Amino acid sequence: MLALIQRVTQASVRIDDDTVGAIGPGLLALVGVEPGDGDAQVARMAQRLLGYRVFADAAGRMNLGLADTGGGLLLVSQFTLAADTASGMRPGFSTAAPPDEAEPVFNQLLRTCREKHAPGVETGRFGAHMVISLVNDGPVTFLLRA
């Protein structure tokens, strides 16, 4: 499982003309599920998403995680994140879990994060064409693996 996280001042996801998820300050996480991902990867990724220290403390150092700040989390499924880009000029998707395997894993991650992060977790819609808007704060962007 992969998550490209971006510290944001705001982020939203739209489908057609409807905003289906939006947050203020917090993290936008684009999540790719790989074949074989399951409970262990979900637990580890949820822990990392909520605890990864990318927010400034009083001294201006990145020492606080999302759980410390109470910011929002916007989780968006993105199978292209798990693409094989090692060679050629076109991505291969054999390294991404097929939708029928990935959707339950993504939904489990969403449930886990919602259970552990009371300030709120928003999302898009699995498999939909989504338009993501964000204001990256920093910019601060990290690729996490679980």
Image (spheres, rainbow, N blue to C red):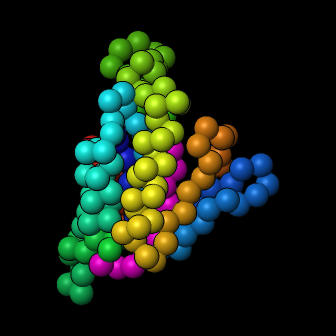
Q: Between 60 and 72, which is closer to the camera in this rendering?
A: 72
Query: Magenta segment: does it hold 97?
Result: no
Q: Residue at the bottom extreme?
A: 58
Q: Position of residue 135 (x, y in %)?
A: 52, 64
Q: Is residue 142 above or below residue 101?
A: below
Task: Name the image quarter holding residue 34.
Answer: top left
Q: Measured from the top left, where is residue 118 in percent x and y?
A: 43, 76
Q: Residue at x 38, y 23 (%)?
A: 95
Q: Nearer the viewer, residue 125 or 90?
A: 125
Compared with 35, 122 (above or below) is below
86 or 105, nearer to the observer: 105
The reply, left or right, for residue 69 in relation to residue 30 is left
Tell me the magenta residue range: 68-77
Residue at position x 42%, y 18% from top? 94
73 in magenta? yes
Name the residue at 37% across, 47% down.
Answer: 3
**Quadrant showing the N terminus:** top left
Overall secondary structure of the magenta section: strand
In-front residue for pair 143/60: 143
> Outermost residue, right direction?
17
Q: Is residue 30 above or below residue 135?
A: above
The residue positioned 24% from the left and 81% from the top of the image is 57
Is residue 20 visible to us here?
yes
